[in-house]
């Protein structure tokens, strides 16, 4: 970002409050693009079995983000740039995570045999 009057780079100083909330979301429920602001509704999911053979997914809106549309576009571009630059690291991390998950899965006793409690008297 540059100052349009001087064409010099703008110095950005970022400060953080100690009590900012961390909000976990699993997906995007709704996006409303507009000018000058846009809005994103994000959700967490809870899967519930219904009485029929269908599975019902309940989405709980957990976050509403309203921001300038230009900033949202810049954010989207930054996310895509970072993903493309770090694709190899993501693949390595994914392989390591799946390897740990497989090791944990292999260490779980099989449920084919009945489990007998280890009781001492």
Image: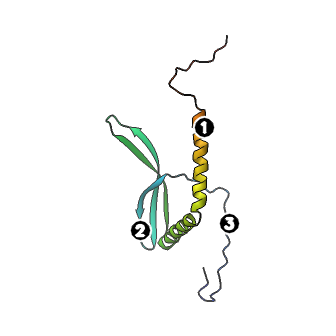
Name which residue lies at 61% across and 33% down. Answer: 107
Q: Give coordinates of residue 59: x percent, y percent.
A: 42, 48
In the image, what residue occupies the spot 42% across and 62% down? 31
Q: Which mark is residue 15?
A: 3
Q: Position of residue 85 (x, y in %)?
A: 58, 66
Horizontal side of 50 relative to 8 (left or right) equals left
Residue drawn at (46%, 70%) of the image: 37
Does the residue at mark 2 contact the one at mark 1 (Cβ under 8 Å)? no
2 vs 3, front mark:
2
Q: CA distance from mark 2 to mark 3?
A: 28 Å
User: Counting residues from the N terminus, which is met first, the one under dot 3 or under dot 1?
Assistant: 3
Residue 9: give x, y in percent of width and height. 65, 82
Of mark 2 and mark 1, the one earlier in the sequence is: 2
- Which numbered dot is residue 8? none
Q: Residues within 10 Å of mark 1 (few under 14, many from 20)?
A: few
- Image quadrant of residue 117? top right
Q: Label 2's element?
A: loop
- What is the total number of numbered labels drawn onto the structure image? 3
The image quadrant where one finds the N terminus is bottom right
- Asked if 67 appears above or below 25 in the picture, the reply is below
Q: Callout 1: helix, strand or loop?
A: helix
Q: Which residue is mark 2?
A: 33
Q: Earlier in the sequence, mark 2 or mark 3?
A: 3
Query: Residue lying furthest top in this view?
Result: 121
Circle 3: is it few (<14), some (14-19), or many (20+) Cα within 10 Å?
few
Q: Which mark is residue 104?
A: 1
The correct choice, above or below, for 18 with respect to 117 in the image is below
């Amino acid at each position: 970002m540059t100052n349009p009057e001087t064409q010099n780079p703008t110095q950005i100083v970022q400060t953080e409050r100690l009590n900012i909330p961390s909000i976990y979301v699993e997906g995007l429920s709704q996006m409303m693009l507009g000018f000058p602001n846009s809005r994103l509704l994000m959700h967490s999911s809870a899967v519930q079995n219904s009485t029929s053979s269908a599975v019902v997914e309940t989405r709980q809106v957990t976050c509403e983000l309203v921001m300038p549309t230009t900033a949202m576009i810049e954010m989207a571009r930054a996310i895509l740039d970072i993903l493309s630059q770090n694709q190899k690291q993501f693949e390595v991390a994914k392989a390591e995570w799946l390897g740990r998950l497989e090791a944990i899965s292999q260490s779980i006793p099989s449920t084919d045999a009945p489990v007998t409690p280890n009781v001492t008297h």
